[in-house]
């Protein structure tokens, strides 16, 4: 059970702990969009050749257009999580602070990193501050102007924008100038619903971008990541429709949870955080019906669930919540 509180998406472990749960499982334990990007036809992938530098540049340019920046600042990664772990090699100024609670990866960027609460970040002077915006798991969202003010006050800022694609106005990237001490990360898999592609991006000043490219080498991502990334980021029609769909489904989920007397918090439309005195009990009750959610060791009143992707999924969750 402990492993189910460390990371979402572990249907394999849930099935072991709940062998009598109905199949198939409904996985609401992550913030990954269950309505994944698709195209007709899907991109052709040449797995007999290494991805070309031109193709990689095309991908970074397509992503840059969506992010609201220039391609020279965008570095494609085999997942944003790996990019965060590689920050150690960029020699960011100490002390390293990270906003907690959030991703465990942020705390591991450097040994002896210092946790801080979000409310106090305006008082930080110097060093490096790492945070997620919107934050996970509480969905807390800061205005990008506030974050940029902190950076321009002398603090290096690392912003994990893994969930920002749903609400592009929350992103600091379009506001950042070439000399601002800001590094941002974006995830492909969460919004596009394709985490197995393993694609992410670092957006950074030119010197940090060049250093990361040097560390990654000539072929940093797979041919699948290149082909799917180019096609998906160019699909502006799908992007616009997906943003509206996710926001509408989040509102539908909020209404459902409210009917069942559950308090919701957070400003990220890809997941909702429920605060209840019986979070572990609710997790167990849902798991016994084949619905996987997520609880947290450090917050016993919190239960996070992703937004269902279909009428059938909403109905199944509604029935499970009603049989308490």
Image (cartoon, rainbow, N blue to C red):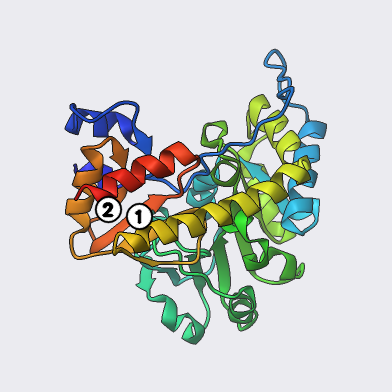
Front-most of residues 10 and 125: 10
The foreground one among 22 and 115 is: 22
Q: Which label is found at residue 40?
A: none
**Furthest residue to the top?**
48
Seen at 60% across and 39% down, the residue is: 199
Q: Against 223, is 183 above or below? A: below
Query: Are there few (<14), some (14-19), or many (20+) residues within 10 Å of tag 1?
Result: many
What is the number of the mark on residue 295? 2
Residue 76 drawn at (x, y percent): 66, 43
Does the image show residue 226? yes
Q: Residue 102, position in %: x, y?
A: 39, 61
The label on residue 304 is: 1
The secondary structure type at the circle numbered 1 is strand
Q: Is residue 168 above or below residue 232?
A: below
Distance from Cα at disc 1 to Cα at disc 2: 6 Å
Relative vertical location of residue 157 with respect to residue 235 in this rendering, above or below: below
| Pointers 1 and 2 in contact (C-beta within 8 Å) | yes
- Residue under the image location 77 percent in, 67 percent down: 178
């Amino acid at each position: 059970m402990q492993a189910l509180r460390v990371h979402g998406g572990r249907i394999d472990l849930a099935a072991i702990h709940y062998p009598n749960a109905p199949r198939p499982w409904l996985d609401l334990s992550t913030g990954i969009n269950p309505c994944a990007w698709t195209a007709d036809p899907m991109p052709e992938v040449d797995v007999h050749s290494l991805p070309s530098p031109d193709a990689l540049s095309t991908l970074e340019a397509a992503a840059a257009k969506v992010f609201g920046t220039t391609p020279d600042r965008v570095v494609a990664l085999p997942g944003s999580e790996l990019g965060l772990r590689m920050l150690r090699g960029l020699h960011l100024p100490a002390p390293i602070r990270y906003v907690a609670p959030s991703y465990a990866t942020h705390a591991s960027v450097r040994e002896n990193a210092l946790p801080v609460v979000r409310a106090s970040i305006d008082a930080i002077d110097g060093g490096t501050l790492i945070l997620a915006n919107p934050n996970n798991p509480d969905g807390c969202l800061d205005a990008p102007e506030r974050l940029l003010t902190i950076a321009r006050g002398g603090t290096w800022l690392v912003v994990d924008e893994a969930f920002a694609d749903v609400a592009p106005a929350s992103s600091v990237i379009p506001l950042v100038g070439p000399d601002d001490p800001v590094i941002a990360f974006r995830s492909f898999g969460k919004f596009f619903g394709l985490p197995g592609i393993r694609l992410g991006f670092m957006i950074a000043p030119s010197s940090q971008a060049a250093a990361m490219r040097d560390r990654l080498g000539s072929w940093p991502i797979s041919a699948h990541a290149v082909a799917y990334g180019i096609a998906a980021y160019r699909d502006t029609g799908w992007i616009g429709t997906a943003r509206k769909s996710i926001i509408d489904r989040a509102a539908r989920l909020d209404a459902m949870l409210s009917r069942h007397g559950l308090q919701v918090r957070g400003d990220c439309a890809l997941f909702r955080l429920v605060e209840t005195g019986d979070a572990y009990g609710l997790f167990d009750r849902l798991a016994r019906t084949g619905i996987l959610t997520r609880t947290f060791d450090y917050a016993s009143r919190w239960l996070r669930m992703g937004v269902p992707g279909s009428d059938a999924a909403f109905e199944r969750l509604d029935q499970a919540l009603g049989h308490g």
